[in-house]
Amino acid sequence: MKKIGLIFDLDGVIVDTAIYHYKAWKTIADELGFDFSLLQNEQLKGVSRMESLDRLLGFGGIKNLTDEEKLKLAERKNKLYVSFISKLTPEAVLPGVDQFMNSLAFENVGVALGSASKNAMTILKQIEYIDVFNAVIDGTKVKRSKPDPEVFLKAAAELDIDAENCIVFEDAEAGIKAAKLAGMKAIGVGDEQILKEANLIIPGFENFDFETCKRQFNL
């Protein structure tokens, strides 16, 4: 069997920190005087901090901020977010993820993280997942955010596995598009309506193991 690369997004796939992103962005929106909904928050998943800020400001109809003002808002959002995730523990790992990772122990796979988050290493340390991945590509190592495939292509390169032999696990529409643009297979984790372009959609990792993955993709 060819060596397979498994590339995981972080937020919403390994651990659910999306609610903390939402709380931090909502605080910024409240301070700027407009409402920000969970539905709107879906459009911020998987993209860079500055692009998320631009989308947030668009929801509020706020224009003409200087680059310096935007940077200050982005920095404030990040400080709020970091204060939330600093309290994470291994119990924050989503149901079934530990078991799925354990099922890879004797498989011919490379395991990578492919996340837009610049706080990925902080989160991995908090949940004691630093040693789980053979490669970690995060927001500090890429210039372009999803749906650009850069993060996944870099993860594949670091694993030394061809893109066509990689499978991406994603919970965001932008991430699914990025995986497809990279020439990889995509497994959507979460909402079928949002992730409809994925090759396979699962509600989560409970009752899902690598044997199921191999059958699905004839590996």
Image (spheres, rainbow, N blue to C red):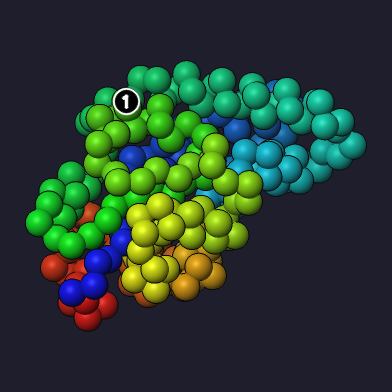
Q: Label 1: few (<14), some or many (≥20) within 10 Å?
A: some
At 76% from the left and 46% from the top, the residue drawn is: 58
At 57% from the left and 26% from the top, the residue drawn is: 78
Is residue 128 depicted above or below 165 in this figure?
above
Q: Name the residue under label 1.
A: 126
Image quarter of the C terminus: bottom left
Which of these two is toward me, 128 or 19?
128
**Residue 96 appearing in the image:** no
Residue projecting furthest to the left? 106
Q: Quadrant of residue 6?
A: bottom left
At 56% from the left and 20% from the top, the residue drawn is: 79
Q: Quadrant of residue 162?
A: bottom left
Could you tell whether 211 is left or right of 30 in the image?
Answer: left
Residue projecting furthest to the front? 160
Could you tell whether 71 is left or right of 20 in the image?
Answer: right
Image quarter of the N terminus: bottom left
**Residue 29 appearing in the image:** yes
SS for callout 1: helix
Number of callouts in the render? 1
Could you tell whether 142 is left or right of 129 in the image?
Answer: right
Could you tell whether 130 is left or right of 180 in the image?
Answer: left
Residue projecting furthest to the bottom? 218
Residue 212 is situated, as x and y percent measured from the top left of the image, at: 17, 69
Which three-letter amino acid code belongs to the residue tagged 1?
Answer: Gln
At 54% from the left and 42% from the top, the residue drawn is: 141
Residue 153 is situated, as x and y percent measured from the top left of the image, at: 48, 60
Residue 128 is situated, as x and y percent measured from the top left of the image, at: 25, 30
Which of these two is toward me, 11 or 146?
146
Is residue 12 depicted above or below 82 in this figure?
below
